[in-house]
Image (cartoon, grey):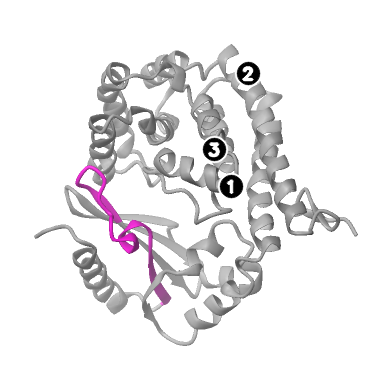
């Protein structure tokens, strides 16, 4: 069967029918992600992103359900109270864009229309855009300050560093769209940066990830050890949900497609992020190859400190971009650095 958006939606609906027979806590289910774009495949593989809303705290936050080697369901489980204040959700940097235009697949009563109406009201107003962006930038600055005081170069530290970079990038990206997709992170960012008025941000983001050391041979050489770490970590009880054996082809095929298309630097974000998530779940004795790779990319020890210094300047320049946006919309007197000042 060809992997089309329609086929993937049918798979989602079939799974939902099975789930709701046994789980009466589900209030609503909606579809988000690449399936809705009409172009879900990257390297011939994709996932189906679903959000299950429960009337009580769900037992798990994330669930991966294999469908085939090329397709799996990626399900987030959210509690209903997270949606109780729809007008506040419109300035939430993740849930707001997520609720803007998903596909409702199931609900047990009035929920979706009410929440979405609150989210969509003034969603694109400059004040709302700025607040969503400022929230991301604020998270980045907090993480950065914690990192700059530390001297560790282990997976938990690098995971925090990568999360900081993620927030900085999304502070720019969500000015013109939803949160960046994981595999397409570096494929999508250049267009978003240009739309925000600073296409130079794309190269600066790549620098924060060690792009100056990247070529096809290097990435191809690292893929087998990344895969070994991924497989070893995928069976661990406390590993992040993204490190699941059903997602190995999802990442690997995307990496291969990026390399074949001549865009090897786009591999960097999903490769480094998933490798760090996997290494984080393993004992120190199994982190040697991860450590060697990150030293090569200039992301450990003195290299990390250098990257933190340039990241500080990057954040300042993103901040200035937001200030300019505020001024262009007559908001600079009342809205700066994420807070009202008059």
Residue under numbered circle 1 = 196
Rendering coords of residue 211 (x, y %): 45, 23
Rendering coords of residue 133 (x, y %): 64, 51
Q: Is residue 33 shown in magenta?
A: yes
Residue at image point 32% right, 17% down? 218
Q: Secondary structure at mark 2?
A: helix
Work out how far the residue at label 3 is from the one at label 1, CA to CA, in angstroms: 8 Å
Q: Is residue 23 shown in magenta?
A: no
State if disc 2 and disc 3 touch (CB < 8 Å). Answer: no
Q: Is residue 261 above or below residue 288?
A: below
Q: Quarter of the image containing the C terminus?
A: bottom right
The boundaries of the magenta stretch are: 25-47
Residue under numbered circle 3 = 199
Neighbour tally class for label 1: few under 14, some 14-19, many 20 plus, Cα within 10 Å: some
Res 329 visible: yes
Q: Is residue 129 above or below residue 18?
A: above
In the rendered structure, the answer to whether residue 316 lies left or right of residue 296 reads: right
């Amino acid at each position: 069967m060809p992997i089309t958006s329609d086929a993937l939606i049918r798979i989602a609906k079939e799974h939902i029918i099975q789930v709701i027979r046994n789980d009466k806590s589900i209030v609503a289910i909606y579809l988000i992600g690449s399936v809705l774009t009409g172009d879900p495949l990257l390297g011939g593989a994709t996932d189906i992103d679903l959000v299950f809303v429960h009337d009580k705290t769900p037992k798990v936050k994330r669930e991966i359900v294999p469908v085939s080697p090329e397709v799996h369901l990626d399900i987030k489980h959210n509690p209903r109270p997270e949606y109780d204040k729809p007008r506040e959700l419109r300035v939430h940097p993740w849930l707001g864009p997520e609720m803007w235009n998903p596909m409702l697949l199931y609900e047990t009563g009035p929920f979706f229309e009410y929440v979405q109406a609150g989210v969509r009201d003034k969603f694109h107003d400059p004040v709302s855009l700025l607040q969503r962006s400022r929230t991301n930038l604020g998270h980045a600055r907090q993480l950065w300050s914690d990192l700059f005081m530390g001297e560790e170069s282990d997976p938990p530290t690098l995971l925090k560093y990568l999360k900081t970079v993620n927030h900085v990038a999304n502070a720019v990206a969500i000015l013109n769209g939803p949160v960046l997709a994981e595999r397409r992170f570096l494929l999508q960012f250049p267009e978003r940066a240009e739309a925000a008025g600073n296409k130079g941000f794309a190269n600066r983001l790549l620098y924060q990830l060690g792009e100056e050391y990247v070529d096809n041979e290097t990435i191809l050489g690292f893929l087998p050890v990344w895969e070994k770490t991924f497989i070893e970590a995928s069976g661990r009880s406390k590993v992040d949900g993204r490190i699941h054996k059903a997602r190995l082809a999802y990442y690997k095929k995307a990496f291969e497609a990026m390399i074949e298309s001549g865009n090897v630097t786009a591999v960097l974000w999903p490769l480094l992020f998933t490798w760090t998530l996997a290494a984080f779940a393993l004992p120190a004795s199994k982190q040697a190859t991860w450590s060697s790779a990150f030293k090569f990319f200039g992301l450990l020890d003195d290299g990390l400190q250098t990257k933190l210094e340039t990241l500080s300047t990057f954040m300042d320049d993103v901040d200035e971009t937001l200030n300019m946006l505020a001024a262009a919309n007559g908001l600079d007197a009342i809205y700066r650095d994420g807070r009202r000042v008059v």
